[in-house]
Amino acid sequence: MRIPTTPATLALDAAGVPWTGHAFGHEDDVEGYGQEAAEALGIPEERIFKTLVVDSGAKGRHELAVAVVAVADRLDTKAVARELGVKRCSMADVAAAERATGYVVGGISPFGQKTRLPMLVDQRITDHGTVFVSGGRRGFDVELSPDALLTATGARLADVRQA
């Protein structure tokens, strides 16, 4: 499959970050995007990281941030709230997440987002030599080192997965 050019790949190239693209067939009726990628690429779910948008704002006021956690794990929103210094947070509304990032859910990449949001990356990412994250569209992941991901995004490492 052809490797697409996306805002994520353009951002990685502009940052001088080495990456490898992996395109795979995406089925429209699939909702477990990370699991689909793991299966299609033959990669353990611990090495594929999902990009989740959270909202810590009061009713009617969006305060968005991004959390990156392994597909094999669940996000701990209480831990994210603590790391962000807020009382609570929850998963962002789909429309708000898509509007802020410029990507569709299932294809939200940590790179090249329309609005640069505060970003936390689960510290378990450093357990791997390379990891996979969305390349900016469903059916396309990029592989890179954890250090490259952190450098390109300015993200902060934190323990944000449920134990």
Image (spheres, rainbow, N blue to C red):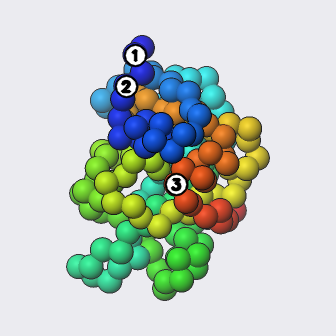
Q: Which residue is mark 2?
A: 4
Is disc 3 placed on a helix, strand or loop?
helix
Q: Is residue 9 left or right of residue 39?
A: left
Q: Earlier in the sequence, mark 3 or mark 2?
A: 2
Q: Does the rendering let one see residue 129?
A: yes
Is disc 1 placed on a helix, strand or loop?
loop
In the image shown, does 55 or 74 lie closer to the viewer?
Answer: 55
Q: What residue is drawn where x is 27% and y is 79%?
A: 61
Q: What residue is drawn where x is 23% and y is 79%?
A: 60
For badge 2, the amino acid type reads Pro
- In the rendered structure, are the residues bearing label 2 and label 1 in contact, judged by CB atoms less than 8 Å apart? yes
Q: Which residue is mark 1?
A: 2
For badge 3, the amino acid type reads Thr
In the image shown, does 40 or 123 lie closer to the viewer?
Answer: 123
Q: Is residue 31 left or right of residue 43?
A: left
The alpha-carbon separation of the residues under discs 3 and 2 comes to 20 Å
The alpha-carbon separation of the residues under discs 3 and 1 comes to 25 Å
For badge 1, the amino acid type reads Arg
